[in-house]
Amino acid sequence: MRKNNHNHKGEQMLRFKVIVFISVLVFSASLFGAKMVGKVQSVSRKAKLIQFVNPKTKKVNIVKFNSKTKLLEVSSFKALKPGSKISVQVDKNGVAKSIKLILVKVAAEKRISTSDLAKMIENGDDFFLGDARPPGKCGMGHIPGAVNTFTKTLKKNMHLLPKNKNKLLVFYCGGPSCPLSPKAAKMAEKMGYKNVKVYVDGVPAWKKSKRPVEVDTGWLKKRLNVNHVIVDMRSASEIAKGHIPGAIQFSYLDVKNMDKKYKSRGVKSKKKLLFGIRDKKAPIILYSNNNMGKDVVASYKIIASWKYKSAAVLSGGFSNWSKKGLKIESGKPAFSAKYVKKMEKGAATDESFISAARTGNKMIIDVRSEAEASDGVAPYSINIPLDQLKDNLHRIPKKGGVILYCSTGSRACMGYNTFKKAGYKNVTYLNDQFDELLRSHNIDTVSLEQSEKMAGRIVKKSKKKMPRKSMHRRNMDDEEGC
């Protein structure tokens, strides 16, 4: 009898183990075969990592990809621009099996191309152009003549649309994966508008074609500060009579000559700077007397080719500004920029990075690849490539300051989010070109070996463990994504 009871208990235990084992298998399959959706924040092709955020939960995901990762609805990782909506399928190691660009569905007959829209604007055709993006996005630069018709508030603002229901309406937003313009078009059709089209490619394609975007006077009058760069392209005599407060005098000829010098020296586009401004997201507003003068448009194209992403032209120019009775200054304008970059969340100040590079008062981590770091690093820095950060977090102290940097700031930002998810509160990142920042303060880069020796001495004094040099010698393909 006891034997039977023992067998019965054994059978129960076996069934329990089988159930648990099956449950673990199902859980593992659902976890590792997960599909995640979100908007691209940044892509590092060097570290083979993509960062995206879920718009609903605000959760930030960082996923590794490799040569086996399939790209769907997109030709290259370079085409995955910030703001693009994607679906990511990961394998059992958390590496992306596939990354799909989620495209909006709009019938071919309802689409309009970049060239056709440009012709309509240039010819002065009678049609309505609606920017379906949020007011903040639209304000920073919209296609000339567009009216902000943000989809979420359009029902309350139908008065913005023309009364003539037969008039052509064209809506656009942030590109082929942005659903706002198709939604706005459907709303207009429900209201009885019979001729509605969608410029699906939107602002990214418009900017890529080097066609200018514009900002309105109402938007600019609230932003006459050091976080914005205003460029007056008129003659010196006109500027002396009156100009927008804080404007810098710089003509098309100045821009053209500067571009020639850069080209003659073989300077890469990302290294071409206007007024020494390294921040390629700096809002740069150009204006002349009228709306879209040839010199302003030509200057915009050159500056945009230097990879400045937030360059724009003032709608209506100075004549529109003065006509509206907005503030004007007379006398000599500025000849150099006093631009101050608006700090992103988690970004380190230039001063804190420079101080750390001079004294070693904070741990500095170079998250570039070992090959990049071999060309020179910031003094007192150690090298832990971005894709290896997760496996080495336990080596980084949670007390004392830590600053991450890379070539431009994008990988450092990814690293910052990795630390943040792990509970670190003492980490910041440099949102800048570290080498240019060092150079502007007369600090030379040093060899990785020299830098790690410098950093080692500082760590020895504070009795903190230092990541070994072998940490960055691992094969990048062996790393798992976050």
Image (cartoon, grey):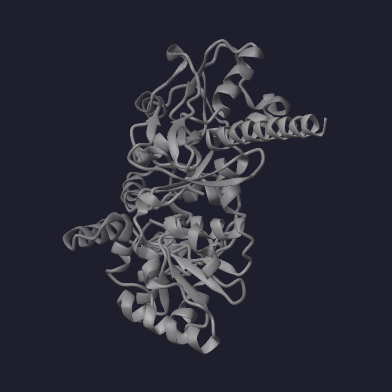
Tell me the residue at 49%/35% (across/down): 88
Which quarter of the figure is the N terminus placed in?
top right
x and y, in percent, of residue 52 in the image: 53, 43
x and y, in percent, of residue 354 in the image: 46, 78
Q: Quadrant of residue 225?
A: bottom right
Q: Quadrant of residue 469?
A: bottom left
Taking depth in this image into account, of 29 and 480 the one nearest to the observer is 29
Taking depth in this image into account, of 199 and 168 the one nearest to the observer is 199
348 vs 114, left or right, is right
Number of labels in the image equals: 0
Which residue of the protein is positioned furthest toward the bottom in this rendering? 461
Look at the picture and state if 357 lies above or below 215.
below
x and y, in percent, of residue 274 in the image: 36, 62
Which residue of the protein is positioned furthest toward the left in this rendering? 264
x and y, in percent, of residue 402 in the image: 54, 72
Look at the picture and state if 49 lies above or below 129.
below
Tell me the residue at 62%/45% (across/down): 59
Is residue 445 visible in the rendered image? The answer is no
Taking depth in this image into account, of 272 and 103 the one nearest to the observer is 103
Tell me the residue at 49%/83% (across/down): 459
Is residue 255 visible in the rendered image? The answer is yes
